[in-house]
Image: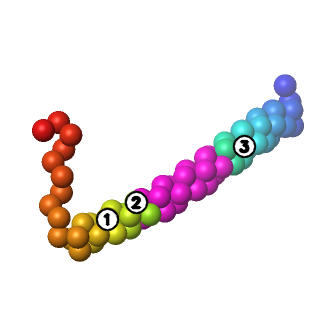
Amino acid sequence: MTEIESLSARIDALEMRLTFQDETIEDLNKAIIAQWKQIDGLTRQLAQIEDRVAVGEQRADLAGLPEPPPPHY
C-alpha cells in the first residue's frame, strides 16, 4: 500500500467516523428536545394542580368546615 493509499484510507475512515458522530449528535439533540418538551408539559401540569389545590384549600377555609375523615375511618 502506498503512502497516498494509506492517507486516503485514513481520510475515508475519519469521514465515516465524522458522519457517525454527526448522526449520533443529531439523535441526542432530538432526544433532549423531546425531553425538554415533556418536562415543560409536566411543569405546566404541576402548576395547574398546585393552583387547583390552593383553590380547594381556600374554599375549605372559607366554608369553615373541618375536613371530613378519610373513608377508612
Q: Residue furthest top?
A: 1
- The mark that comes first in sequence, 3 or 2, is 3
Q: Give the labeled residue for mark 3.
A: 23
**Distance of label 1 from label 3 (alpha carbons):** 49 Å
Horizontal side, residue 60 vs residue 46: left or right: left
Give the amino acid at mark 1. Answer: Gly
What is the x, y in percent for residue 3?
Answer: 83, 35
> Residue 8 in magenta?
no
Quarter containing the C terminus: top left
Please name the residue that numbered disc 2 is placed on: 49
Residue tagged 1: 56
Q: CA distance from mark 2 to mark 1?
A: 10 Å
Magenta residues span 28-47
User: Can residue 3 be seen from the camera position used here?
Assistant: no
Q: State which mark lies toward you, 1 or 3.
A: 1
Q: Residue at x 17, y 36 (%)?
A: 72
Answer with left or right where residue 29 lies relative to residue 47. Answer: right
SS at mark 2 in the image: helix
